[in-house]
Amino acid sequence: MNNSKAKETFFSTFNLILILRINLMAKTIEQFEESLFTENDGSKFSNIKDKLIKSFSPSDREKVIEIFIQYSKNGKMLHWREFLLTDIINLVKEDETNYSDFFEWTITKPELTYWGIDGLTKTKGIKAYKTLIELAQNESLPTDVRAKAIKSIATHSKQPFDRDLPQDPGYWKIENFRINELLDWKSKEYKLGSGYKEPQTHPSLKNPKTELEKAVSKLDNKLKIERSKQQDLSNPSDWLAIADKNKIEAIEQKWKLPENYLLFLKNYSPINVFIDNEKFFQGLNLYGADDLIKSQNGYSFNSMTSEILSDWPPNYIVIADAGADPYCIDISAITNNDAPIYTSMHGNGKWEFEKYADSFVDFLKDIIE
């Protein structure tokens, strides 16, 4: 067989295999689609959906989106019609206006409006603002839907309509809505904002020298992973930041803290730091300078009655909690600029403390492991 004939045979065979693979893939997508529409079990539905995304979205994203759109319109499991919207939004690209009609439809359906809002913003951009402001003003809609509209505008426009509010708009209250600001912004033709700055961090996080700095730096590296997954700077989380001086002054007026812990609060104050670690029941909330004083409520005092609770050791300052189980630094046992950490289970009728770590630095090292 000459070279020309061999090449012709090779390419014919290659094309045949390619056609067969394309046909097989198309058939497989159809099989997935059929399984999706006939499945009655929610767990199995979720597995089918995830496999469909993983196997076919890299090569046939539009087809996967279309399948999900059709299920959102006609699928028999109503709760999954809603849940699929988050997958559709993730698969759709910014300013893909060919999907705008679908999201325009979703916001007319009460069960789909909440998540459809983000899809409308993603596909229409600034052109969605007018509709979203109308939703925010509509007093007949649920509070969370109105809040979601404002949150979506704030995120997309980088305007601070969500400042100092929970990251999840489902926790907003009507009095949190900045409708007048929205309308004023609308009258100025939707000017793009500058967004939020990252919290200010201490240089030693990148160049640690002391034992405390090295422990904190390792903790920050761990938190960076969480920050990279999801971060909303209107309500930042998993940061170790330089604390407000007024907060530190209030703390120093209230207690004499060991130097290591005070430096930690000043230079690496936790902002919404939650350590998801099996060592700690329901994970560990690590308090920062903003939270320290108010977080003693329920332990050493009752803020409702302004009553000092007599069963609480006055030398124990709660610096963290795991499902309300307190972790306390003992300020009566300060040595070498540090102090031991004690813990106790709550809800047993009385506090029974046991030592958890010999020092605050050791406590940080335990968190890191």
Image: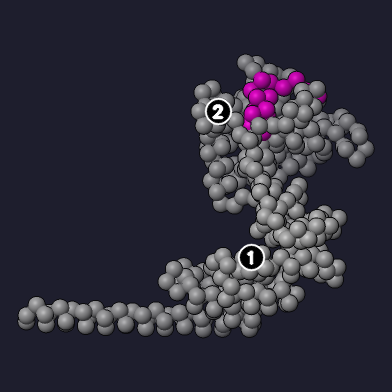
| Range shown magenta | 254-269
Query: SS class of the residue under badge 2?
Result: helix
The prevailing secondary structure element of the residues shown in magenta is helix
Given residues 207 and 46, the one toward you in this image is: 207
Residue 132 coordinates in the image, percent (x, y): 74, 67
Which quadrant is home to the N terminus? bottom left
Identify which amino acid the numbered label 2 is placed on: Ser
| Residue 125 - label | 1
Q: Residue at x 46, y 67 (%)?
A: 54
Q: Which picture quadrant has residue 344?
A: top right
Res. 208 in view: yes
Looking at the image, residue 329 sits to the left or right of residue 304; the answer is left
Kindly report the distance in space between the C-alpha atoms of the residues bearing marks 1 and 2. Answer: 40 Å
Dot 1 amino acid type? Gly
Disc 2 target residue: 204
Residue 96 sits above or below residue 19 on the image: above
> Residue shown at 65%/74% (left/top)?
103
Q: Nearer the viewer, residue 308 or 9?
A: 9
